[in-house]
Amino acid sequence: MNFSKEDILKAFHERHACKLFDDKKKIPQEDVDFLLEIGRLSPSSFGMEQWKFLVITSQDLKEKLRPVCWNQPQITTCSHLIGYLAKKSFLKNPDYYRPMYERKADMLPDEDLREKAIKRYENFVNAFDDKSLACWSAKQCYIAAANMMSVGAMIGIDSCPIEGFEKDKVEEILELNTKDYEISMFVAFGYRVNPPTKKYRLPIDQLVEYR
């Protein structure tokens, strides 16, 4: 499937925060796998892949989450609700980050250079307190989520990013080990009931400065 620039812009113009999905229409597993692969291939700081994708299809679980997600209808009407879990303790654990560098042996064949790269990462990440570490990790989740929503729009899948929720209660319902993970956001994916509303954006000359 080839996309022209016009096709891509059309998808971006039509992409919107879908507030109500057709709960009778489900995304084919092939397309779900495709979106997850887009997320997996997304860039991340230091290549640490700070995300875990929690794919929620259970209607019972969606119903439990809705009251602590500001009662938003997209929680229960979407086909697939994906929770973006930001990794925490892993990021300071050598058992996690050292293999992430060792797998790049073909890119960094010199062991001394690899060790220097690891040391640079350690100096960076160890400067974070727990709150700052979680914040940095969550930022990476947003990159993956944005890519998945954008590509979803290109193949006709609607979405809605969701930050409005009671974090502690969500993590309790999801039975997360909050030492290792915290919920950064949700994205609801599915198919719209209503046509998208008009898109409002600032003009490009108010957003761009060349130097």
Image (spheres, rainbow, N blue to C red):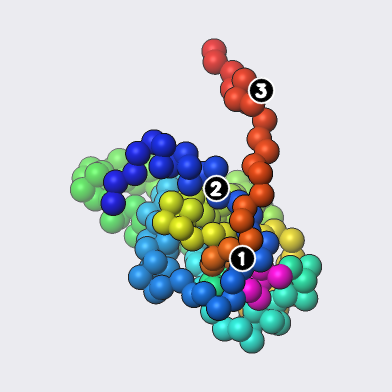
Find disc 3 in the rendering and name its residue: 206
For residue 13, above or below residue 22:
above
Q: Secondary structure at mark 2?
A: helix
Q: First in sequence, mark 2 or 3: give its number.
A: 2
Residue 120 position, x and y percent, is 45, 42
Q: Secondary structure at mark 1?
A: loop
Q: Residue furthest front?
A: 195
Q: Residue furthest top?
A: 211
For residue 182, above or below residue 136:
below
For residue 61, above or below residue 120:
below
Q: First in sequence, mark 2 or 1: give its number.
A: 2
Q: Is residue 22 visible?
A: yes
Q: Residues within 10 Å of mark 3 (few under 14, many from 20)?
A: few
Q: Residues within 10 Å of mark 1 (few under 14, many from 20)?
A: some
Find disc 2 in the rendering and name its residue: 14
Q: Which secondary structure is most common in the magenta stretch?
A: helix
| Amino acid marked by disc 1 | Val
Please tell me whether mark 2 or mark 3 is closer to you in this view.
2
| Amino acid marked by disc 3 | Gln
Q: CA distance from mark 3 to mark 1?
A: 33 Å
In this picture, which residue range is highlighted in magenta? 73-78
| Amino acid marked by disc 2 | Glu
Q: Mark 3 and 1 residues: CB-CB less than 8 Å, in contact?
A: no
Q: Secondary structure at mark 3?
A: helix
Q: Mark 2 and 3 residues: CB-CB less than 8 Å, in contact?
A: no
Find disc 1 in the rendering and name its residue: 193
